[in-house]
Amino acid sequence: MKSLRRMTLALNVLIGLTASVLAVGCAGVKPVSSGTGGSGGTMVPPSIPGLVSIEVSPGSQSVNLTATGTVLSANASYTATGHFMDGHSEDVTARVGWPSQFRSLRVNAGMASVSAPGTYTVTAQSGSVMGTATLIASFSGNRYAPGFDPGAAPALDAAPAGPAMIAYPLDKALFPPNLSPLTVHITRSTAQQSQARINFSSENVVNVNYYALCTGAVGNGCYVDLPLEITQLFIAVSESHDIKLTARVGGPGAQLLESAPINVAWANVPLSGGLYYWTTISTGIVPGYVPPPNADNTPGTRGTGILRYDFGKDGAAAPQLVYTDKGKGPLFQGSPPATADSAQCVGCHAITNDGKTMALTIGGSGASDFALLDLTTLSMAVLDPTASNGATSLTDINYYKQFRKSGVATMTTFGPNGDVMVNMYKSQLRLQGTNSSLVFQGMVVPSWPEYKSDPFWSQSGKYLAFTSFTPMNVGVYNPTGLNGDMKRNGQIVIATAEANQIHDDAHVLVPREPNITKYYPAISNDDKLLVYNQSNCTGEVDLYTNPVTMEGIYGQQTCDGYDDSSASLWLTSPDGSFRAVRLDIANGGPTYDNSWPRWSPDNGTFRGRRLYWVAFSSRRPYGMQVNLGAPLSTKPQIWFAAILIGGELFGDPSYPPVWLPNQNLTAPGALLNQVPTGNHVPQWVKVAVPIPG
């Protein structure tokens, strides 16, 4: 108990939470605004001289929202009375600002308009002086999805005859406000149960029925997509209470089934920036793209590429194809393959904070080459001019060799300004420039005696974290033993840094343990938290001494650090102010392969605590659609989870994870996510630059 209290105190100091509320903006959720008298501006007026306090009246009001089509609205009025140093009081309603955390509440000169249910804090502010009141906005009503006949709704309101189950979302999941669509997966007993009613309720403030057709999913179930216009009704409510979600399925001549309720919530902290991840691409999925010969050890069947979510542009609606192992464009020419008859995987990517430059490993991590891609033009930097032997034709395989260089990096992390990078090659770290000359600037932490891999330079430039391991790891993935994919007995090490250099002061942050390896560290945007992976070294097939084919097998090499079935997420702090904790709620199980964690480039507040999003790849089941079979048949998918820090910490601060929508590339007309692609190595940067189509 004493250690728990010490950890709680350390976390409170670490995060430095205040009572103020951080304003955030996103698609459908706007930054904090304020009314200034009758101007409706966004700036809080200057301080009123002599003002000591503000009293807002009435102290509490309740309104019922009315619907005009799909638009909800209600109004209320407030008065701000200012109390001054000389003892007098006066009406300052038109002189103070009226800031709001939520887009759904606007207050100008005391006149409040609200467009979504919730319990709101109405604030009058002048400089640092504030007064507050409460506005409770309630709504009860129905919404209908496109294509659903409202005349079928009464049958879904009847008494249910049997049980169903919500397979997704996960109970107690926390969602960002700009995730779209959120898909509800429901079990059913027959395909005739093709209609659904999703009910949302909370604390007598909201009670909404959403009626929709229930689309057949892989396996015995169906799903309903919830658009933003529905989920954004629950953002303000979630600030104080969870939303109870219950699902029904039925249809003409079919039994009506109802699920037990689950609890979910929406935070007013959006996904932001750009999230880039590695994916596999099968024949016929991307128009005009044909995988290179021998792709994925099966001729002509599957290639590789990088996809991106631009959260600032369209939330999480769909990812964008950035680059492939055959370039980007109508002819898919431009990527530098080694030979004309060999597939060349592109991956182990890293992106500068300004979103303009991507580093790529080409050819796999064992014998990797290096390339730099300008994301604003999708053009490769010339790194080895003589390698092309004067070839100028785009159809000549030799032409593309000038855009790659060997012996540079298997993994990369960029400095905060994007002008330098730390490269891992043969389990050593090198500091180099990011222009085409790749100017070598010295070995990183040269006094550190062990092998080094998985470098991560924090967004601020303050820290460099990496994995330290010994001895050399020789195995089926890396016959040379030094590509950094496998790290037996890894430990997390950290050094201080600046914008352009790493100090030679590395020390162990998370020490090694027997039969455990720790790897893939990542530091949050504010330098307060560090997440990493941990894998067990027992109970797995030892492919060092018993090599077998790796086709269809993942994570079976003893104590490896690449796509390991026992990989789990752990949390600590870069300054070591609290001990590491396993994120059991986010992990969800011991063999889900929760790997490659990366933080969102921003954070915010939820229910008075600091909220972070962390993305990772996982082989856990996604409802009724993906990864429903045996572990060896699953595919890694991109998930993210909320981490909530502040107040009393009783163990694990994570939430159940959320699947990123539409991440699997499917052929036109194919059942949604029927054949999942392999998606992993998420990289999350602050800026998502426009990418040529």
Image (spheres, rainbow, N blue to C red):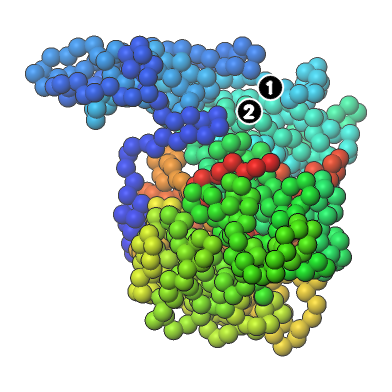
Q: Secondary structure at mark 2?
A: helix
Q: Are marks 2 and 1 in contact (CB under 8 Å)?
A: yes
Specify whether residue 217 is in view: yes
Q: Position of residue 288 (x, y in %)?
A: 82, 48
> x, y (%) of residue 305?
71, 56
Residue toward you, 494 or 431:
431
Q: Is residue 404 above or below residue 281?
A: below
- Which corner quadrant of the image does residue 279 belong to? bottom right
- Front residue of 668/541: it is 668
Percent position of residue 150, x then y: 77, 18
- Which residue extends farthest front? 390
Quadrant of the rendering where the C terminus is positioned: top right
* Label whose residue precedes the other's in the sequence (2 or 1): 1
The residue labelled by disc 1 is 143
Along the line of sight, which residue is nearer the eye, 499 or 587? 499
Residue where numbered disc 2 is placed: 230
Residue flagged by tag 2: what amino acid is it? Ile
Name above or below for residue 594 compared with residue 55: below
Q: Amino acid at mark 1?
A: Arg
Residue at the extreme bottom of the image, as rendered:
545
